[in-house]
Image (cartoon, rainbow, N blue to C red):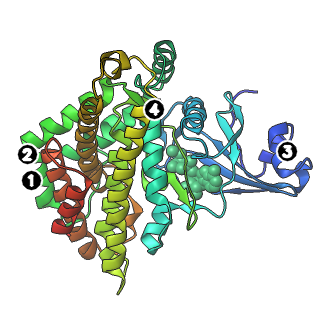
Amino acid sequence: MAYKALTVDTLPERLKGVAALAAQVGDDATAWQVQEVGDGNLNLVFIVTGPGGKAIVKQALPYVRLVGDSWPLPLYRAYFEYHALTRQAARDPGSVPSVYHFDEAQALIIMEFLAPHVILRRKLIAGERVAGLAEFLGRYCARTAFRGSELSMQRPDKKADVALFAGNVEIPAITEALVFTDPYFDAEMNSHTEGLEPVIARLRADVGLKVKVQQALQRFVSNTETMVHGDLHSGSIMSTDSDSRVIDPEFVQYGPMGFDIGMLCANFLMAYFSQPAHRGSDLAAYQAWILGVIADTCSIFETEFRHLWATERTGILFPASLFEDQDHDSSPACDAVSAGLWRDAWAVCGIEMHRRCLSLAHNADFEDIADASVRAPLEARNLLMGAELIHTADTLADAMAVCALARDYN
Ligand code: ADP
Ligand code: MG
Ligand code: MG
Ligand code: MG
């Protein structure tokens, strides 16, 4: 059958023959209940509930859901999301929902229903803490960065993978435009909170800043050092109070090792800057918790990356024949790789802080602040710190320095 978007009414009839779904929810499709819960910008997401349990059915639409059919988008993103999920599961077991079934023609993935997980961004807006969050995210970012690179992978596998994901053309194009370019000119789909005009004018007048951003874009499009999630914001993480998973890798591509952790830190920083509008007497303590998550995520990333460097360096890069086998410590080499990775990460971090307030697809941390006169000054702090991160990405000592900067701008 040719591609056709599912509806809550047609799903049971159309998917009743999929054994992998019946195995999760029960054989009797007439007893299935279907709910559409997609709150993202792009796809249909259904929860199917049957006598045997629940499953998620995610189906790509041939256009951008947020905008409508005036902006077509290829269905093939489901294919890349599926292949990303299998690699993430291999590189960091347990980090992503289990995949039960993939149908390329229908652009649909049937996967594990995460419960009682909720989107991390909602928890951050509500002031809830998640135990083990930094450990999970630091390890996830380090393992996927390391194990998807030539530090670990064999050459033929890496080249085949880069070739496979290079077929994902239109989805990274969204990042290239919305993240790296649109914030810095008067792009058609941009929007911003009233009152930010002077700050925006300052960013666009800063030629040095635009050069750094375009250099970051140059690395993003041409550096294929590892498989990145590509959209690792707090809306792509689901958590309980003590367990977390990463979802929604349709923006997958081979790209810079620092990309995911940089975007992730930006989303924690935006949660931090938005908190004065969401919290009462617990504001200081909760903001401190968020900065602690940033610092811990980055230090756990470092620890895990170094552990993998010492124990899993099986690729062509920095071989033992050049270091350990000649009785040379390779940790200075690891230091150099790590330093380059963080330079990329902090630039991406600052750019992500810009685009979420200036381009299409803003984040709820700020959008949920109804009063523009409250929202604008908080977004302004975020924009100005973003610019400083982009300018100083090459010289920032570490995540502690980034947290100190956030306290200065707050
Ligand atoms: P999009 O690509 O459109 O952003 P997402 O994969 O982010 O779609 O999913 C949209 C929403 O559906 C998520 O915010 C979450 O609420 C819900 N969702 C997605 N995957 C799962 C899952 N495996 N378990 C439970 N809920 C999910
Ligand atoms: Mg999403
Ligand atoms: Mg998505
Ligand atoms: Mg906004």
Query: Which residue appears at 44% of the width and 74% of the height?
Result: 127
Q: Residue furthest bottom?
A: 281
Q: Which dot, 3 or 2, sits closer to the camera?
A: 3
In three-dimensional space, the C-alpha distance between marks 2 and 4, rounded to whole angstroms, equals 44 Å
306 left or right, relative to 120: left
Q: Which mark is residue 254?
A: none
Give the labeled residue for mark 3.
22
Furthest residue in direction front, as rendered:
327
The label nearer to you, 4 versus 1, is 4
Q: Confirm or deny contact between disc 2 and disc 1 (CB under 8 A).
A: yes
Amino acid at the residue labelled 4: Thr
Mark 1, Cα crowd under 10 Å, few <14 / some 14-19 / many 20+, is: few
Circle 2: residue type: Asp
Q: Secondary structure at mark 2?
A: loop
Asked whether the residues under the numbered discs 3 and 1 touch, taking CB atoms below 8 Å apart as contact, a structural biologist would say no
Question: How far apart are labels 3 and 2 at the CA level?
Answer: 57 Å
Q: Is residue 135 visible?
A: yes
Residue 253, x across and y down, in percent: 44, 30
Q: Residue at x 11, y 60 (%)?
A: 198
Give me the residue at 17% from left, 48% from top.
396
Residue position for label 4: 311
Judging by the rendered image, the residue that carries numbered circle 1 is 202
Instruction: Please state which amino acid type lies under the numbered disc 3.
Output: Ala
Question: Closer to us: mark 3 or mark 1?
Answer: 3
Nearer to me, 116 or 1: 116
Which quarter of the rendered picture does the N terminus lie within? top right
Relative to 119, say whether 398 is above or below: above
Q: Residue at x 57, y 46 (%)?
A: 95
- Residue 5 in sight from this viewpoint: no
Reading the image, the residue beneath label 2 is 206
Determine whether the residue tagged by mark 4 lies in a helix, strand or loop: helix
